[in-house]
Image (tube, rainbow, N blue to C red):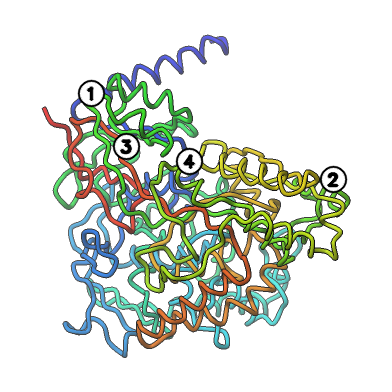
Amino acid sequence: MKKGKFLFFFIFTMILATVIFSSDSKTVVYEQERAAETMDPVMVIDTASFEVLSNVYENLIEPAGTSLTEYKAVLSTNVPSEKDGTILDDGKTYIFHIRQGVRFQNGDLLTPEDVVYSLERDIIVGMAGGNSHELTEPLLPKIGDSYVSSISRWAVKLANVKKWDDLFASDTKVPKNEEYKQALIKTFKLLAKDFEIKGNDVIIHLPHSYSPFFNSIIDSVAMIMDKKWAVAHGAWPGTAETWWKYYNPTRQRDPLYSITNGTGPFQVYEWVKGRQVIMKRFDGYWGEPAKIKYAIIKTVPEFTTRKLDLIRGNADIISVPPQFIGQVKNIKGVVVSENIPELAEYQISFAFSVASHSKYIYSGKLDGNGVPPDFFSNLDIRKGFEYLFPHKLYIKDVWNGLGIEPNSPISKGLLGYDPNMPVYHQDLEKAAEYFKKAYNGEVWKKGFKVAIIYNSTDPTMKQACEILKNYARKVNPKFKVEAVPMLWASLVNSFLENDIPLIALDWFGTSSYDRVYGYLSSHGVYGLALGEKFREFARKEFDPIINAAVSAPTLEEAEKIYKEIGMKTYEQAIMIWLIQPSRQLVYRDWLKGLYPDNYNPFRDKDLVFYHLYKSE
């Protein structure tokens, strides 16, 4: 068959399949701008992938209702508590009664061994920039007074080498010698001794008390998977002797990259990368079966197309940028639910240093045609940029007022949020004052050129970057900020490779610790992406105080420390906090089971199809 005919046949089949599914009262179609990047839970760092997998896989426990502090049993039949004797040893031992009779989507029965394997694998895979730190910190012993965010740190310590790559022969994962191999095996045993299986119970022995442990189980992407199935498909076999071969793979080389087998109410029926995911109801689900048969998540970058599909009934629910909410409010048969609480924050981040070969610093020198790699390690530069941005105008005009101005990494609603904390407001005279001080006046005299990167499918970020660009030029015509769009997958890779000096991103986290760790720790995802100069700064200024917050004996003491962290981010002008948005749901009135039934702050980026159905 000729290529042109094949392409036509493929597109026609895709359109026909979507129309058939869409016309079915047992099918829900959701259109959004982003595309899933992986089907392996432990490799997820994007919301689009998690949106799929949170309908396919399950955790031991989940949040109860809209609470951030109460939980319900899922694959465990209990939520451990001191009252019933399933939390012991001053909060260091947790006993989970594993639900019996639960089947994976390939028919295998859930066992306690699957639970242990899944939790261990999350730490073993340890993808750079991922979420494995949320389990690694409670489950591995501290090094000195510091929590360990990656299993590789213990391997490096036990082998007495400087870095992970020193353990292996060049460009391989073969240990250089028997001593290093034994250090790697001993590292795994530090993790393995945390787990005990007695009958149908999984008993977890933490090496230290860790107050946010329940949140770690929920926030991490260590959803429970079938060990036998995973191993059969080439995943880590569960052995101490081989774990390092599976550490920090690239997404495409991950053996579970494109396949799934969960215990959840839906299973992946088809994934067309970059286009759509079709999920089918799992009729062997241990709970009540879902009301709908199919759930389709389509990637449709253009809002106009999503809007037309909603009007025509080809989509049941769509994502709508806040500036376009007015366009869907008065459409017959369309419901708009506004101002749903959300725990996301949007920000512009400064890389304290970037790779010297980065094309986004242009000349790489302070000569008017670029910036040096460590340009944003200068506090005067960061403060100058802070005073450029018109926060209130941005929220009003770009977001239609649908959100509030954040003042630190800690969102309103989380422990340590302080509404009285100072914030930066646009003040172009102050901006000029700080820019004139920077680099002994050379910045003001010569000017600079630097790129700010944003997700090409997010118009709110585009406008934030354009606003910053325009006001920089207004302060000094020699200041050139180039707003550069980038596809999401490329953006994530470049960000994690420390290639981007200035970036507009959003971040979602459901605990104060998750927020300050992700943004500010030398081991967090931003710590990886913002350069060695940032990590040096964070090791001194943030790591000790973050450890103190999570180790605080009372909530009152933790709250005080989180406020101190927030104030330090203001004083050091760490990021430009743009908005803590509220969420909007836009859907056809025949779709039922949405907010508030379908909302939980731990999952407010996800659409939980299990609750949805269509009225006749």
Residue 551 located left or right of residue 583: right
Query: Which residue in the protein does label 1 denote?
Result: 332
Mark-to-mark CA distance, 2 and 4: 30 Å
The amino acid sitting under disc 3 is Met
The label number, if any, that marks residue 369 in the structure image? 2
Q: CA distance from mark 3 to mark 2?
A: 50 Å
Looking at the image, which is closer to me, 59 or 578? 578
Query: Which mark, residue 279?
Result: 3
How many numbered circles are shown?
A: 4
Q: Quadrant of residue 456?
A: top right
Judge the density around disc 2: few (<14), some (14-19), many (≥20) Cα neighbours within 10 Å: some
Residue of label 4: 398
Q: Secondary structure at mark 2?
A: loop
Q: Position of residue 390 (x, y in %)?
A: 56, 50
- In the image, 556: left or right of 514? left
User: Which residue type does callout 2 highlight?
Assistant: Asn
Q: Which is more N-terminal, label 2 or label 3?
A: 3
**Viewer-proximal residue among 277 and 312:** 312
- In screen coordinates, is 86 left or right of 239? left
